[in-house]
Image (tube, rainbow, N blue to C red):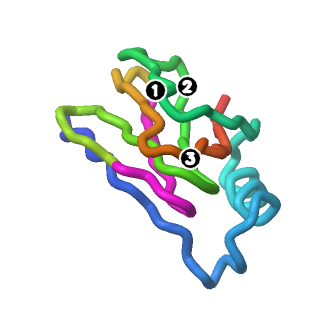
Amino acid sequence: MSKLIMDVESWNSDWGKLSESNMRKRLEDEGFRVVTYTYSPGTYFSEHSHTVDKKDTVLSGKFKMTALGKKFILGPGDMLLVPAGTAHTAEVIGDDPVISLDATKY
């Protein structure tokens, strides 16, 4: 069995200007269903998992996620694929809200 690897993917300028519509199109082209959320400073999601693959993305603000014993800091344009069944936490860090495109694959 191969070891699960998670890594932050950053927005590529070849995909156009970072915007909600461009990021949504990119995620939908990858087969994800997308919902936009705004999380207030201090928002914390305790350890949980999902039954589907999920890609957490950030349009603005900073999101700290932990999974597989690693910490990931996501800023504007960053995306993190969280495979189905992977236990993880998420937290808004800093004083700014996080605008996130929550992408799930069914």
Q: Nearer the viewer, residue 54 or 48?
A: 48
Residue 65, image quadrant = top left
Indicate the quadrant where residue 49 lies.
top left
Is 87 located above or below residue 9 in the figure?
above
Measured from the top left, where is residue 39 in percent x and y?
62, 33
Q: Earlier in the sequence, mark 3 or mark 2?
A: 2
Q: Which residues are magenta?
A: 73-83
Give the overall secondary structure of the magenta segment.
Answer: strand
Query: Mark 2 highlights which residue?
Result: 52
Q: Quadrant of residue 48?
A: top left
Q: Nearer the viewer, residue 37 or 80?
A: 37
Which mark is nearer the camera, 3 or 1?
3
Classify residue 81 as left or right of residue 38: left
User: Which of the pair 61/36 is nearer the observer?
Assistant: 61
According to the picture, the residue beneath numbered tag 1 turns out to be 84
State how far apart marks 1 and 2 are (Cα): 4 Å
Helix, strand or loop at disc 2?
A: loop
Q: Secondary structure at mark 1?
A: loop
* Amino acid type of the residue that numbered disc 3 sits on in the rendered structure: Asp
- Above or below, 65 against 29 in this view is above
> Does residue 87 belong to the magenta stretch?
no
Q: State the residue position of label 3.
A: 96
Q: Position of residue 4 (x, y in %)?
A: 26, 39
* Residue depicted at 64% across the width and 38% down the height: 102
